[in-house]
Image (cartoon, rainbow, N blue to C red):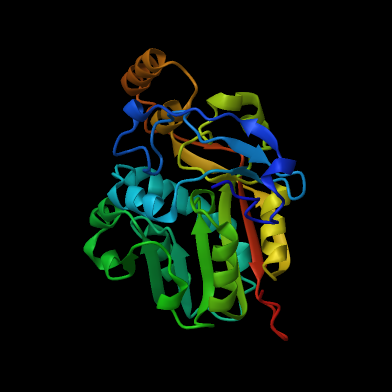
């Protein structure tokens, strides 16, 4: 069934085609719904909303299909997850400084829980993560597994106003209803608490230059954000002091080569040369069009939808 824009409900008939569907069932693997995989450049049909600028799949899979796919997804990106978490912490520190307290934090789509461990170093005592992939949880060290609940995010599992910080990194693109996540986070935050997301920015220079060869063209993505649309999501969900900004990711050269739009043969040659030269593990900090956005729950009368 065709859906309207999941942020502003503008009808799909008013949107223009952004990407035509490009799917090949024979190319689907256990890594197709895994994080930080090699790009497959497959995608659902994506429309661009004329009202809020969101790019969204107008006929996404059903929620139970998505949940099943992520539950079975494989996982082999522990090194990259640590690199990503380190970049996220640098980007999120100015937001942490504005919190009224640092008692508890929730991460939606926590993977192995590595970012939760970094939050522990910032003074958070109660740490909770939600992660659908059994393989990702199995890859977590034992001391983190007690923080992680397997499954898709379910607001009813948590008490209202029980968190000071809720994070959702590279996850809002993957859910059917990102507004449901943002609005649920509002209800779960204490007054003065913050909701923080990291998403791709499809309008960034690198993504515009790469076009269909950008890694963000992916079967997993139910929507793609711009700075305008991620701010619209938080504004419409009742957050105050909404801000968004770009930041840099630092990964090993071998990972950047994996993401590059080079043909597979050239990637393998470049990878072997990088290994031989001792450069494959060297970290490179690059702005690849990712954005961090945040908003705070009002401390006065609730604006929650």
- Report the residue at 50% width, 55% height from top: 169
Figure label count: 0
The quarter of the picture where residue 214 lies is: top right
* Percent of width and height locating residue 268: 35, 18
**Residue 75: quadrant of the picture:** top left
282 vs 188, left or right, is left
Viewer-proximal residue, 280 or 138?
A: 138
Residue 251 visible in the current orientation: yes
Q: Is residue 78 left or right of residue 228?
A: left
Foreground residue, 124 or 152?
152
Q: How far across and down, in percent of the image, does residue 249 sit?
A: 53, 43
Q: x%, y% of residue 218?
A: 48, 36
Give 197 or 98, whichever is nearer the viewer.
Answer: 197
Question: Which residue does the image show at 29% across and 42% down from the upper left?
Answer: 76
Given residues 86 and 232, the one toward you in this image is: 232
Q: Residue at x 63, y 46 (%)?
A: 225
């Amino acid at each position: 069934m065709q859906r309207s824009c999941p942020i502003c409900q503008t009808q799909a008939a008013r949107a223009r085609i952004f990407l035509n569907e490009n799917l090949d069932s024979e190319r689907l693997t256990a890594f197709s719904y895994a994080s930080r995989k090699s790009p497959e450049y497959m995608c659902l049909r994506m429309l661009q909303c004329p009202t809020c600028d969101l790019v969204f799949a107008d006929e996404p899979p059903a929620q139970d299909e998505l949940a099943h796919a992520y539950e079975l997804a494989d996982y082999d990106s522990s090194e990259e997850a640590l690199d990503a978490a380190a970049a996220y912490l640098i980007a999120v520190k100015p937001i942490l400084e504005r919190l009224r307290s640092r008692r508890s934090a929730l991460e939606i789509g926590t993977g192995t829980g590595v970012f939760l461990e970094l939050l522990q170093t910032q003074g958070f005592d109660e740490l909770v993560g939600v992660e659908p992939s059994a393989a990702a949880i199995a890859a977590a060290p034992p001391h983190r597994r007690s923080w992680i609940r397997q499954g898709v995010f379910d607001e009813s599992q948590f008490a209202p106003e029980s968190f000071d910080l809720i994070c959702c990194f590279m996850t809002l693109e993957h859910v059917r209803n990102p507004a449901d996540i943002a609005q649920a986070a509002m209800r779960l935050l204490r007054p003065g608490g913050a909701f923080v997301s990291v998403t791709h920015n499809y309008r960034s220079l690198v993504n515009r230059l790469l076009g269909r060869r950008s890694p963000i063209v992916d079967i997993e993505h139910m929507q793609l954000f711009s700075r305008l649309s991620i701010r619209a999501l938080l504004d419409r969900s009742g957050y105050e002091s909404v801000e968004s900004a770009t930041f840099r990711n630092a990964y090993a050269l071998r990972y950047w080569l994996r993401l590059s739009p080079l043909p597979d043969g050239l990637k393998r040659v470049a990878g072997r040369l990088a290994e031989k030269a001792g450069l494959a593990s060297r970290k490179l900090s690059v702005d690849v069009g990712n954005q961090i956005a945040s908003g705070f729950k009002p401390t006065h009368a609730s604006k929650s939808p």
